[in-house]
């Protein structure tokens, strides 16, 4: 993703600093790369989608500390790939992640740290969350279902417009 204000690299950096024994990976690049100063953060630079997904395959926890989102594709991909998702409490993220059901929603740095500590210290992957997240993607966010939902919205709007 873009290393921009929206994606909150400053918070990502603070989270990484709190876990010096963990490796953090930022897949992407951007103008605020200088905000990622923790020695345990690697920035991949811009890569194609296939390479980004290969990087994603090797991670355990997906972090999205964004200040705002729409419908974050990277989050949907992480859920589909059965990653533990830990996200900020903003529209877009919390529309997809239902706290403690299919991932974790965090309000601030302390929440992120507490969640990641629980995950990493448990030495046990929360399979229920991962399976719930994957099922959510397969049943609600696949391309066929999304196309039908958009078509329904479009048709409703067209009917409303031409009834006048």
Image (cartoon, helix red, strand yellow):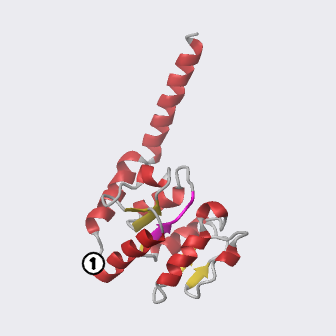
Q: Quadrant of the N terminus?
A: bottom right
- Residue at 56% from the left image edge and 53% from the top image edge: 69
Q: Seen in the image, is 137 located left or right of residue 38?
A: left
Residue 72 magenta: no
- Which residue is at the front of the view, 98 or 112? 112
Residue in the image at 67% along x and 65% along y: 4
138 relative to 7 in the view: left or right: left
Residue 119 spot, x, y in % from top left: 34, 76
Residue situated in front as seen by the camera: 141 or 143: 141
Residue range in magenta is: 62-67
Q: Is residue 101 left or right of residue 30?
A: left
Question: How far across and down, in percent of the image, does residue 61 sit?
Answer: 42, 73
Vertical position of residue 69 compared to residue 26: above or below: above
Which residue is labeled 1 in the image? Answer: 124
Relative horizontal placement of residue 83, taking residue 39 as reference (left or right): left
Residue 66 lies in the magenta-colored region: yes
| Residue 123 seen anywhere in this rendered image of the structure | no
Give SS at disc 1: loop
Does residue 85 appear anywhere in the picture? Answer: yes
What is the x, y in percent for residue 13? Answer: 57, 77
Residue 158 position in % (x across, y down): 56, 21
Question: Which corner quadrant holds the C terminus?
Answer: top right
**How many callouts does the rendering have?**
1
Tag 1: Cα neighbours inside 10 Å, few (<14), some, or many (≥20)? few
Q: Residue at x 55, y 61 (%)?
A: 66
Give the image quarter of residue 127.
Answer: bottom left
């Amino acid at each position: 993703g873009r290393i921009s204000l929206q994606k909150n690299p400053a918070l990502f950096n603070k989270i990484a600093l709190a876990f010096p024994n963990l490796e953090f990976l930022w897949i992407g690049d951007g103008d605020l790369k200088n905000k990622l100063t923790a020695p345990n953060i690697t920035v991949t630079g811009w890569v194609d989608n296939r390479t980004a997904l290969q990087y994603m395959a090797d991670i355990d926890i997906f972090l999205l500390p964004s200040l705002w989102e729409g419908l974050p594709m990277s989050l949907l991909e992480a859920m589909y790939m059965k990653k533990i998702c830990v996200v900020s409490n903003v529209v877009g993220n919390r529309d997809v992640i239902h706290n403690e059901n299919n991932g974790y929603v965090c309000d601030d740095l302390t929440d992120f740290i507490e969640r990641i500590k629980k995950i990493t210290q448990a030495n046990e992957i929360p399979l229920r969350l991962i399976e719930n997240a994957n099922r959510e993607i397969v049943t609600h966010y696949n391309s066929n279902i999304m196309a039908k939902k958009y078509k329904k919205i479009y048709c409703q709007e067209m009917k409303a417009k031409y009834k006048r």
